[in-house]
Image (cartoon, rainbow, N blue to C red):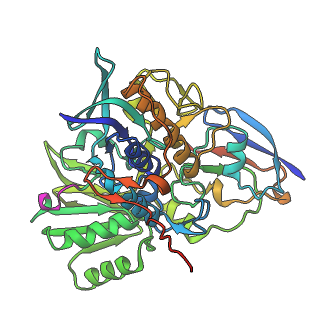
Amino acid sequence: MDVKITVIDREGVAHPLDAPTDMAMNIMEVCKAFELPVDGICGGMAMCASCQLYVLSDHELVEKSPDEEAMLSEALHVKENSRLGCQIPMNEKLEGLKVELAPE
Amino acid sequence: MIKTDIVIIGAGPTGLFAVFEAGLLKLRCHLIDSLPQPGGQCAEIYPKKPIYDIPSQPEILAEDLVDKLMSQIEPFQPGFTLGETAQDIEKKSDGSFVVTTDKGTRHHASVVAIAGGLGTFEPRKPDLEDLSFWEEKGVEYIIRDPEKYRDKKLLIAGGGDSALDWTIVLADIANEVTLVHRRKEFRGALDSVKKVQALKDQNKIQLITLAEVSALNGNSHLSSVTVAQGESERNIAVDYFIPLFGLTPKLGPMINWGLEIEKNAIKVDNTLDYQTNVPGIYAVGDVNTYPGKLKLILCGFHEATLMCQSAFQRIHPGKRNVLKYTTVSGITGFDGSLKKAKKSTIKTIE
């Protein structure tokens, strides 16, 4: 089952994506799979913040782990709605999710 | 000037393994890396994390992989220029190259192999006004010689391992150490967290949490920093402000070397030998891109192996060579050492 999500890139362009929910992907990986400019340098260990994004829709997301909290406390451009894309697994509940990539 | 056969830029797993494959072909290597230790991302980002997709290693810690590679290449005596960034490359009339680092160290080689991973690790900088003005005037991102801070007043910012580790080391050396962190929680080895707690309890350091540096003050040299904690602000007199917010990789100076770049990686023309658009310069491992590219350590090993065969032909044009199996031929190090399988014993049974 795919869900429709929207990722706004750093130039403000909105990319509607059909994100698979059955491939054990997280949002960082979905962005990479669609060749959006997300580095995911640490590969998804919540250790680099290169997949930081702002959540624009009011979806209920998985809670931040201590690792994600710690990384976000050190990263730049952090806002109230900042999350690390690599820490949010894709699932059906994310239908209609809208996120914006944080500056590099 | 350092002279070698292959200068390898990047001392991560791919760069290190290239030394081994080059050594089998009797080619000498010298590695340049901007980090102070070999291992690349494995050493810098995730040394204590396990890797599960190295062939024959069901589970290996990143730091152990680096240690094993270092031990594997020991017979081939690689040289290292560590803590320096490859800055410039110059092609000589004979087709060889001179690679110069940001510190001015020069390396001459017939072949250049870029195994630069995601690029040069650069410090993540805090978002402060006039920050660049204060660099070299009291703001430092990398500690090279702790002695520089003897009897000085320091303010360290950050909540990870390096902030904790340097607070511990510098507490004994500096006159005053203040550690500032945005949160109360620190992400570091348990032992380091306990040590910093003890230093704080003994009043050997000042710890300010739920706070961050909001301004830098001084004339020709930094003299104080403003620390904001909630609504309140205070000035703390310092000689040095050391923000330790981790390192982030950037492709860096290589971007100006005339190499074809695609998607923040160096494009290689083919998967025959991973040569770039500049003959004699190869790109292997995570730094390169080609159709079907996978950024995996095991792919880097394969690419390094093919690259060395091509480098051999470039260094010794037309020279006949044949692939040798280490089980048969053993390994002859440049130090004269020989590792070899034991001869089988043949005895008669009457």
Up the image or down, B160 lies above or below B117; here it is: below
- Over which residues does the magenta segment extend? B144-148
**In this orientation, which residue lies closer to the viewer: B213 or B198?**
B198
The kind of secondary structure the magenta stretch mainly shows is helix
Question: Does residue A104 appear in the picture of this structure?
Answer: no
Residue at 59 percent across and 57 percent down: it is A80
The picture quadrant where one finds residue A61 is bottom right
Task: Where is residue A51? Give x, y as percent.
Answer: 59, 49
Residue B256 is left or right of residue A98, and the answer is left
Q: Where in the figure is residue B231, as x and y percent of width and height?
A: 40, 63
Residue A83 appears at what percent x and percent y?
62, 56
Vertical arrangement, residue B185 with respect to residue B290, above or below: below
Of residues A65 and B272, the one drawn nearer to the viewer in this rendering: B272
Q: Residue at x 60, y 32 (%)?
A: B271
Q: Which residue is located at x 60 percent, y 57 percent?
A: A44
Q: Residue at x 41, y 59 (%)?
A: B43
